[in-house]
Amino acid sequence: MKSKIGIIIGREFNERVRKKSFIITTILTPLLMIGLMLAPVLLAQYSGSEAKRIAVVDESKVIGQHLQSSEEIAFEITDKPIDAARKEFSEHHAILHIGPDIMSSSSSAKLYTNSTVSITLEQNIAAQLKMVVEGIKLQQHNIENLPAILAATKTDINLQSFSNDGTEENSAEKANSSIVATVVAYILSFILYMFILIYGVAVMQSVIEEKNSRVLEVIVSSVKPVEMMLGKILGVASVALLQIVIWLVLIFGVGYFALPEIIPDEISMAVAMLQQGASPEAIGSNTDMGLLQAIATLTDVGYLMKITLSLLVLMIGGFLLYAALFAAVGSSVDNPQDAQQLQTPITIPIILSIMIMLMVINDPTSEVAFWFSMIPLTSPIVMMARIPYDIPSWEIYLSIGILIATFIAVVWAAGKIYRVGILMHGKKPTFKELWKWMRY
């Protein structure tokens, strides 16, 4: 049995790895991900347009003079009445009308637009009006040296986060970054979502193609259907695992050689001091503690190993679980169109996992996060979103144990459907018929 499954695994592996599409996606996907991360910054930097010209009709006579133009907005004060200004400044982007009772009524400001106005522009104008009105109200209290008092009371807090395991063996404080945890959770959860869905559907399509070509009818004469299904699932899983490993090697390799060249020596020393539990006073008050904590977390070997191993285990477990379900669906139908109805109940938990993942990022220790990280159909993605937040290890082990046990049960049930479905043609089965196949 082992040798037959090994032959099927080798066939599935070689068939996919030798394709040009595999090589291209393996190389281009990391570059695409880097491009997607850099795209917003580049677009914000190079997509600048001319400042929006805003004519200001200030009936209060105290607000308009304090409005400050910027690269996005150019304010132009006018003495004309609002009706005349709306006609004369029709070529401007908008006309801002400030009523005489702006100090007592928040609805006395109106913006008359001559073209589409973005919500960002409205928020910027509203923020400036709010700041000017509040400043004038403060001055009306006749507080001496008010600007100096406000400047002196302005304080920035550099809040450091440290893991607290409560053991004497690891009593040294260990810096961590919630920003890094959030970004890592977000990216890795989507990677799992992509692999489970894409490669799971690939298993289903492969089964449908071989079933339509009647190749399976020849193969099952010498190989048991369950062996055929396991070989196909494990073969595709090995391809997905290889691709993930290549990406991790590229990421860690580039990071290992690039970070020392990018990070200045003083920053590297500060990160080392932070990892050893140094106080902000010892590191330096002018240092951005948030940046240091992010670098300290990303260069923590233990943290990276935990994330990497968790990703590989959850990816394999989640893929094997869903691949068995997709293989059962593929064996039950004759074409991809018929598979849509049976495929929907499988894809719903995957989509639900992404929705729960967004909630997990806000509160990784909530009851919703805990229970959905234990339910096998959602646990791979949801648990991957929780792990970067340093949750208790027993929760990770329990989730993985439940996932493995569920995979074994699903493979048993899917194997019963598979052995009947691969020889059935010309009829799309119902869920009731699938249940009967499982009981044969």
Image (cartoon, helix red, strand yellow):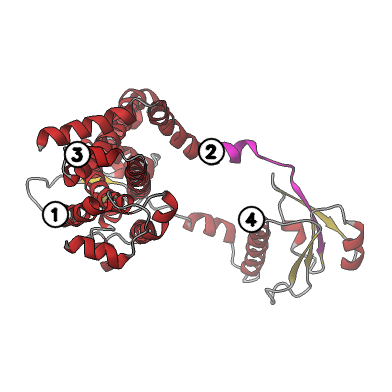
Q: Secondary structure at mark 2?
A: helix
Q: Residues within 10 Å of mark 2 (few under 14, many from 20)?
A: few
Q: Which residue is mark 2?
A: 39
Return the disc, 2 or 4, that comes first in the chain's sequence: 2
Quarter of the figure with residue 112: bottom right
Q: 137 left or right of 200?
A: right
- The residue at the point 49 percent across, 55 percent down is 152
Return the disc, 3 or 2, that comes first in the chain's sequence: 2
- What separation in Å lies between label 3 and label 4 (alpha carbons)? 42 Å
Which amino acid type is marked by label 1?
Gly
From this viewpoint, is residue 388 visible? no
Which amino acid type is marked by label 3?
Gly
- The residue at the point 65 percent across, 56 percent down is 124
Q: Which residue is mark 3?
A: 302
Q: Is residue 40 above or below residue 373?
A: above
CB under 8 Å between callouts 2 and 1? no
Return the disc, 1 or 3, that comes first in the chain's sequence: 3
- What separation in Å lies between label 1 and label 3 (alpha carbons)? 22 Å
CB under 8 Å between callouts 3 and 4? no
Segment tinted magenta in the rendering: 41-57
- The residue at the point 71 percent across, 52 percent down is 68
Nearer the camera: disc 3 or disc 2: 2
Q: 145 left or right of 396?
A: right
- What separation in Å lies between label 3 and label 2 (alpha carbons)? 31 Å
Quarter of the figure with residue 263: top left
